Amino acid sequence: MSLRVGTLLAAPVTAFLLALCVAPLLILFAYSFFRVDFVAISYDPSFANYAKIAGSATYRGLILKAFGSGALVVAITAVIGYPVAWFLAKRAGAMKSALLTLLLVPLYSGDLVRVFAWRVLLGAEGVINRSLIWAGVTDAPIQGLLFSPLATHIALTYNYLPFMVIGLWLAFESLDDAWLEAAADLGARSPSRFARVTLPLTFPGLVAGGLMVFVMVVGDYLTPQLLGGASGITVISAINDLFGTAFDWPLGSAIAWTMLAILMAFFAVGAMLIRRSSLVGGS
Amino acid sequence: MDRRLFLKSALAGTALGAFGPAGRALAATDLLWMTWENLAKDDYLAPFLDSHDVDLTKTFIGTDDEQFAKLRAGGASSVDLITPGLDKVSYYTASDLLQPIDFDKVPNAKLLYDTFKKTDLGKTDGQTYGIPFYWGINPIVYRADLMDEEPDWSVFFEGDKYNGKLAMRDYALEGIMIAAMYLGIPRDEMFTMDDKQLAEVKKVLMIQKSKLRTYWNSIGDLTNLFATGEVVCAFSWVPPYYDLKEKGLEMGMAKPKQGVIGWCDTIAVPKGVEGARRDSVFELVNYLLGPTYGKMLAYGGPYAQSTSAARDEIDEAQQEKIFIKDLSVMDNFVWKQNPPRYNDWVALWNEVKAS
């Protein structure tokens, strides 16, 4: 296929992306410099909205909370995901396809279904609390199991674990066992082999899976809202309030773009890490 | 294809009603009504459509804000009739999106209850832009089997008996109104509170947050929370009270003496609706305020129309249910209004939730 034909074939997709993805983001960016006066947008550009975000402990806190949650869930899913991905790639054998399908089954159900399933498990009258009371571990239901940051992070981990496992599984699939055998022959113990061989060579998968999980956790507001209780507010729900209830599209746009800029920075660092680790792996 | 035709075509796949015989597809007047799904059931509208040469397409809204955002973003030219909250009409008029109601074409408007005739809400410069359509209250609903006595607003701010068992709607306007009523802030100052008053409100809302199990966002979710015992008392809408009572739970509904939040939705006609379409729209408005629709809404909703058109055709039990048996209930209402400093209210609400 000639370059010319390829360009022609890619043109509609490129135009589609520019019109429906890039253009709205640029409009949002432009709005972030305006201000609102009751229900009228004043097209007088300034950095006032960004200054407001920087000066507001609430918005700063919510942004920090979103990225903190993202980092925490990435860490948890990485710890759980490593052995799962290793097993799938190296030990599952003929069961690999079936297990991979099984891994993705939770994603086939809707977000709300999963949230309500967690409520059934974690609620005051839920399966876990009833079991604990039946076993005599506690006299009364543990209220903190549901409508708490704990519930939110359990559900977020469950929701996004498959994305981490897929990233790591792909990395493990391309990991040549000869490297590990050579390390063992040279006297490296298991922890050392993991730290000096497995981890560096699967690092691109960790970063790719981690970024996917991170972005989805940061953008998820339904799970914290429905499982997080009184502390379930997220920066995304605050943006939603600003666009909807308060009709403050400029401030909402500014927060959205602040988030986007930080995420892009994370992506840039991630891409750099993948490139560096590929170079290390290749050498 | 013009914008109207495009929108109608796009909606065709999802619109929930195709009314009457196929011949109506060639009807003289096409109307598009943006409204809540529960107000536009096929059987509610069938009598009107059977007697008028109108093809009605309905597009449903999820929130009042969504409706405004759609119109503000340029949708007004596509829509013939909208259903904004009485407190939100000023948003639309400030954006020059509405035309005044032509009362000559809406004779049933004469039957509006006095409260709605007298209110300044929905009006600008003496002209009505949003005509009150249906109304109700947002009370405290509670599990009578799990609470010792009927609560009032103080249950959300005082004592620790029900800590972790309460729920509040995640909505700045009502949340702050409740705090203001609890604090005894006069009704005529409620929507124009100064910084000092808002600081007091914030202080008690922080206390409230520490007592809440959660903030709720959908009434279905709240009903579920009551049913599972996660929540025993909440600032609510009416439906969980009746729904759970029907299922055998002992439910209570409290209308606090400090004030009850009353709500009312209006019907409004966007600017640019003209000629035969305008005439048909006002015929529809008149029907929506009339006895046939009102009776169906009273039993099917169940909600009260803003006119007395159907009142005598509704039995007393149902009148009681929709609060029209004794209209003095309205004396204690605090009707929702749009505060001039609403952005500050939303910021305060988010500060409390993020604390």
Image: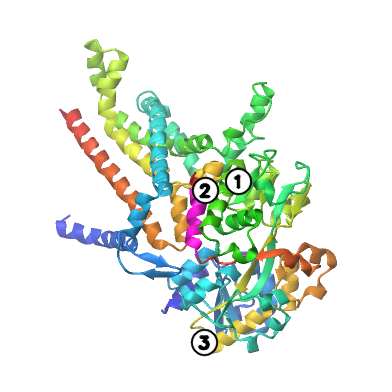
The first of marks 1 and 3 along the sequence is 1
Q: Are marks 3 and 2 on the same chain?
A: yes
State the image quarter where residue B284 is shown.
bottom right
State the image quarter where residue A81 is shown.
top left
Label 1: chain letter: B
Residue B171 place in picture, x, y as percent: 56, 56
Q: Secondary structure at mark 2?
A: helix
Q: Residues within 10 Å of mark 3 (few under 14, many from 20)?
A: few
Label 2: chain letter: B
Above or below residue B113? Residue A236 is above
Which residue is disc 3 drawn over?
A: B274
Distance between mark 1 and mark 3 Cα atoms: 50 Å
Residue drawn at x 63%, y 32% is: A127
> Which residue is at the far right?
B316
- The magenta-colored residue range is B341-352
> Which residue is at the far front?
B196
Q: Secondary structure at mark 3?
A: loop
Distance between mark 1 and mark 2 Cα atoms: 9 Å
Going by the numbered disc 3, the residue's amino acid type is: Glu
Residue drawn at x 39%, y 42% is: A64
State the image quarter where residue A30 is shown.
bottom left
